[in-house]
Image: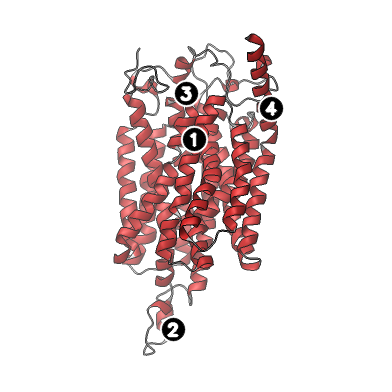
Amino acid sequence: MAWPSVFPRGTALSRFSHHHVVVFLLTFFSYSLLHASRKTFSNVKVSISKQWTPNAFNTTLELPVEIWSSNHLFPNTEEATLFLGMLDTIFLFSYAVGLFISGIVGDRLNLRWVLSFGMCSSALVVFVFGTLTEWLHFYNRWLYCCLWIVNGLLQSTGWPCVVTVMGNWFGKNGRGVVFGLWSACASVGNILGACLASSVLQYGYEYAFLVTASVQFAGGIVIFFGLLVSPEEIGLPGIEAEENFEEDSHRPLINGTENEDEYEPNYSIQESRTVAQVKAISFYQACCLPGVIPYSLAYACLKLVNYSFFFWLPFYLSNNFRWKEAEADQLSIWYDVGGIIGGTLQGFISDILQKRAPVLALSLILAIGSLVGYSRSPNNKSINALLMTVTGFFIGGPSNMISSAISADLGRQELIQGSREALATVTGIVDGTGSIGAAVGQYLVSLIQDNLGWMWVFYFFILMTSCTILFISPLIVREIISLVQRRQAHILSE
């Protein structure tokens, strides 16, 4: 069956139909909405801190402090800020645990149901957390903690599902650039969340939560009725059938062999190549797939750095340069812009090379230099924005590539016959391990900053970036050797 294409014939994208475009957009914006609600919480922390403390409103001495304290959670903004930081850590830990679970669930249930349920349920929790409690003037620490734990678990359904759906529709040829562009969804969500929050924040922080929760709930409904999780749902051939016509379809971008020409899998989930679809693999089997553990550990270090910029960059700009909070929020967008460009361009280069690890290695080495440069940025907004964009390019780009294109490669290795019943589990393992690193990092960043200062925070980022390179160094060496051997074989054949 021919696939009607919306792209010019002869281009790399010519085999993509309008169904691919719809799937790309639906999964892109579904995860953007999930990230927008996270960014909203980051953007309204100052307002929440003021609301939770009596000092912001107790402008007279006529009322006893006890009356104000009975209606609020904390005696001062410092304790409120500390609690908000604890909520970030709670969210990330529950999100990490949820990713391991959601990956397994996504491989066993309908992905559309899981994603839609996660989006709608998370929207309701965000509404209760930020809007309903404020309308009722009900403030309780334990309630906030429980709600944010549940929110982390529900939000974790997003990434494994959308990566799996994208992996079902887009084959490995061109996956780097497609997934590189698509992985900008998180950065777009950050920008969207900041815009939505700032547009209604003047009316109260509860309306920022109300707007993002409403949009996210509506998005979940659209996903339930509009998303096609695989081409087979409408009678189109799956990507495995399409890739059988490609000359090198049997050679994955990620493999665990020393020599590509002598690749002999010693482990297979399928008993026969004639079986059209395999059963979902176990968590242990997914961990044993080549490359999963190294990339998971590497992503734990890299996501720690990437998410530290996500959570701390506006605060750093305000605290270190004494810039206004609104200016710091707007300036921090340039880090996301760099990540979008970096993920797309580096994915394109990795498609040309048919290798991911060498591209990652070069970018991460340059990331160390960019971190050194940004840590010494002068008190100038233009220079800071430029250095921030470069840093986002070399850190956010590799982070996007590991969490999307490389996860899809790992979940579609020849060892498991490209089965999508492994892709969600593998994605959950990689992103879940990364989220554990990010959760630990938020505590360590605050600890280092309080005791040693911001410069030592950047030294810590450089250390974690170096560890990222270290964890994937065997894969880097193996793929570089493969590239050299391919080049030599090409020269000899001429």
> What residue did someone put label 3 on?
171
Q: Nearer the viewer, mark 2 or mark 1?
A: 1
Residue 127 image point, x, y percent: 35, 56
Tell which residue pokes out farthest to the top in this image.
Answer: 493
Point 37% across, 79% down: residue: 57
Q: Nearer the viewer, mark 3 or mark 2?
A: 3
Residue 172 image point, x, y percent: 50, 24
Decide: few, some or many residues near mark 1? Use Cα within 10 Å; few <14, some 14-19, many ≥20.
some
Point 43% across, 64% down: residue: 45
Q: Distance from label 1 to label 4 (Cα)? A: 23 Å
Q: Secondary structure at mark 4?
A: helix
CB atoms at circles 3 and 2 under 8 Å apart? Answer: no
Q: Distance from label 3 to label 2 (Cα)? A: 63 Å
- Give the amino acid type for the residue marked by disc 1 in the picture: Leu
The image quadrant that residue 417 belongs to is: top right
> What residue did someone put label 4 on?
478
Point 59% across, 53% down: residue: 373
User: Foreground residue, 361 or 53?
Assistant: 361
Q: Secondary structure at mark 2?
A: helix
- Give the amino acid type for the residue marked by disc 4 in the picture: Arg
Q: Nearer the viewer, mark 1 or mark 4?
A: 1
- Give the amino acid type for the residue marked by disc 2 in the picture: Glu
> What residue did someone put label 1 on?
345
Mark closer to the chain start, 1 or 3? 3
Q: Does residue 157 appear in this view?
A: no
Q: Secondary structure at mark 1?
A: helix
> What residue did someone put label 2 on?
66
Q: Nearer the viewer, mark 1 or mark 3?
A: 1
